[in-house]
């Protein structure tokens, strides 16, 4: 099922796979949780495809290049992202779903629509463009209480403030900090509104990585019909083979949550 | 956000449209020279010219990466960049903007590729409405002939080969251009396009074009006097 006008040539079909979305603002730990879920799902015998914004063959690199400059206009940016998204939808997600994969996507159309809305772009316009997307089997929204809490994470990650994550192009604050707080606060508001509109499963992401991960497993198990009894507690994060989380960072998360 | 409708900028926007081989670019170049010679500030903008996007388009065409949806969206991205950079600012500055191909090209091509009419129109809702949209109409045989005789190899997407209708590029090109032409024809009333008979002499077409353009320029002068 599509949200709006379906993709050209796409037929209504039943996909044997499942489309699972992990959404949330910058720095809430989406990629950490996707890596954990992937390993867990694979260990349960499920084939997994994971994907995320700007990873398309068609437009991914160009978007990254454009973002390093200072000439990317508001509308151009939205359409560039839409191109990237649809390319991945048609060439990665749909084929994987047809083949029975579990598709884990780091963000979906909601982040793109929220960013557009915060930038004052007509929400009817952006929704119509993304109407071509498939309605996912589940959307897990990693929700954090406030932009201040995100700041702690951004600093803990060692990356510091990013131009786009701070919404500098929207001119909301004097410096990176003010701008980040104003921008992410607005993003959180838009996400809250979308939560009910699109039926997100809201996950309290202010807790430790372990308890969020355990919650996610339980919820994902329901979506894919894994008996919940076999859902074991996650192993220690440090053992995670794909993407090790620095001990210092996870401790900080625990501290921030505690 | 601007929504397709009459703009309030002091500049004027004229666009040319038509199938490949209709002679529209030649006509626009002649108009450009004339307006410049007349002392107007003129700015020229063409399809697929965004510095941020055009390399991606070129690569995707070469490697056949497009589907109808991404073909449409990447061209819309290119057009959005042109609008934000090359069209709105010069119009604000009071210049005459001449655009070689505009949203109608996307409407014709994307719908010919199977995108929904309403969806494509929605995508381009941010476009500025031109003062005049010239549609250089040549019968299908004429346009096809001009392109096929001029080029040894038809380009993959230009010939609509991505649709997989036939393996014969010439046949595919003719089919694709036929669909495009009928989309253009249906847009004449929808968007009030000005049809120019592209089978007439170059001079006659140019004369007609200048007569129409000058009307819009005079209007502006009498307003300021």
Image (cartoon, rainbow, N blue to C red):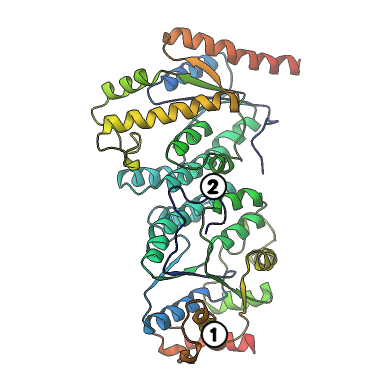
Pointers 2 and 1 within a single chain: yes
Residue at the (65%, 52%) spot, across then down = A123
- Measure the alpha-carbon separation of dots 2 and 1: 36 Å
Residue at the (54%, 51%) spot, across then down = A77
The residue identified by callout 2 is A76
Q: Neighbour class for label 2 at 10 Å: few (<14), some, many (≥20)?
A: many
Q: Quadrant of the C terminus of chain B?
A: top right
* Residue A54 locus on image (x, y percent): 45, 60
Q: Furthest-left residue in view? A: B152
Up/down of A132 relative to B182, above or below = below
The residue identified by callout 1 is A209
Q: Is residue A99 left or right of residue B208?
A: left
Nearer to me, A28 or A220: A220
Q: Which quarter of the picture shows residue A254?
A: bottom right
User: What subunit carries mark 1?
Assistant: A
- Residue A150 visible in image: yes
User: What subunit carries mark 2?
Assistant: A
* Residue A29 locus on image (x, y percent): 54, 76
* Residue B193 locus on image (x, y percent): 56, 22
Up/down of A63 relative to A47, above or below = above
Q: Earlier in the sequence, mark 2 or mark 1?
A: 2
- Residue B98 visible in image: no
Q: Could you tell me which secondary element the residue under label 2 belongs to?
A: helix
């Amino acid at each position: 099922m599509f949200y709006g006008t379906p993709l050209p040539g796409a037929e209504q079909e039943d996909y044997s796979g499942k489309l699972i979305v992990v959404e949330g603002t910058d720095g809430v730990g989406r990629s950490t949780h996707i890596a954990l879920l992937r390993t867990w799902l694979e260990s349960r015998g499920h084939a997994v495809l994971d994907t995320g914004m700007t990873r398309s063959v068609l437009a991914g690199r160009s978007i990254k290049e454009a973002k390093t400059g200072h000439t990317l206009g508001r509308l151009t940016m939205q359409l560039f992202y839409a191109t990237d998204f649809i390319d991945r939808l048609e060439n990665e997600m749909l084929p994987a779903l047809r083949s029975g994969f579990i598709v884990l996507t780091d963000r979906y159309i909601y982040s793109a629509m929220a960013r557009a809305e915060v930038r004052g772009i007509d929400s009817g316009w952006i929704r119509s463009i993304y109407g071509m997307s498939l309605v996912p089997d589940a959307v897990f929204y990693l929700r954090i209480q406030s932009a201040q809490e995100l700041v702690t994470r951004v600093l803990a990650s060692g990356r510091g403030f990013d131009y786009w994550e701070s919404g500098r192009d929207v001119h909301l604050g004097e410096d990176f900090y003010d701008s980040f707080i104003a921008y992410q606060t607005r993003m959180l508001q838009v996400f809250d509104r979308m939560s009910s509109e699109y039926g997100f499963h809201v996950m309290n992401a202010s807790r430790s990585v372990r308890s969020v991960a355990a919650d996610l497993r339980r919820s994902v198990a329901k979506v894919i019909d894994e008996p919940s009894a076999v859902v074991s507690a996650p192993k220690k994060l440090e053992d995670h083979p794909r993407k090790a989380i620095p001990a210092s960072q996870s401790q900080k998360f625990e501290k921030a949550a505690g | 956000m601007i929504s397709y409708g009459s703009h309030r900028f002091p500049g004027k926007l004229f666009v040319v449209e038509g199938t490949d081989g209709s002679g529209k670019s030649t006509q626009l170049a002649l108009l450009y020279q004339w307006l410049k010679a007349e002392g107007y500030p003129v700015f020229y903008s063409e399809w697929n010219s965004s510095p941020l996007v055009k390399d991606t388009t070129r690569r995707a065409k070469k490697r056949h990466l497009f589907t109808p949806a991404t073909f449409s969206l990447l061209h819309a991205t290119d057009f959005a960049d042109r609008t934000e950079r090359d069209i709105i600012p010069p119009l604000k500055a009071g210049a005459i903007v001449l655009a070689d191909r505009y949203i109608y090209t996307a409407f014709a091509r994307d719908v010919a590729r199977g995108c929904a009419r309403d969806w494509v129109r929605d995508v381009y809702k941010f476009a500025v409405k031109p003062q005049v949209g010239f549609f250089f109409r040549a019968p299908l045989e004429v346009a096809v002939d001009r392109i096929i005789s001029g080029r040894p190899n038809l380009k993959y997407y230009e010939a609509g080969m991505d649709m997989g209708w036939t393996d014969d590029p010439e046949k595919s090109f003719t089919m694709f251009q036929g669909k495009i032409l009928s989309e253009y024809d249906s847009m004449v009333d929808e968007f009030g396009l000005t049809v120019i008979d592209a089978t007439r002499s170059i001079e006659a077409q140019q004369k007609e074009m200048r007569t129409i353009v000058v009307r819009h320029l005079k209007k502006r002068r009498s307003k300021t006097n």
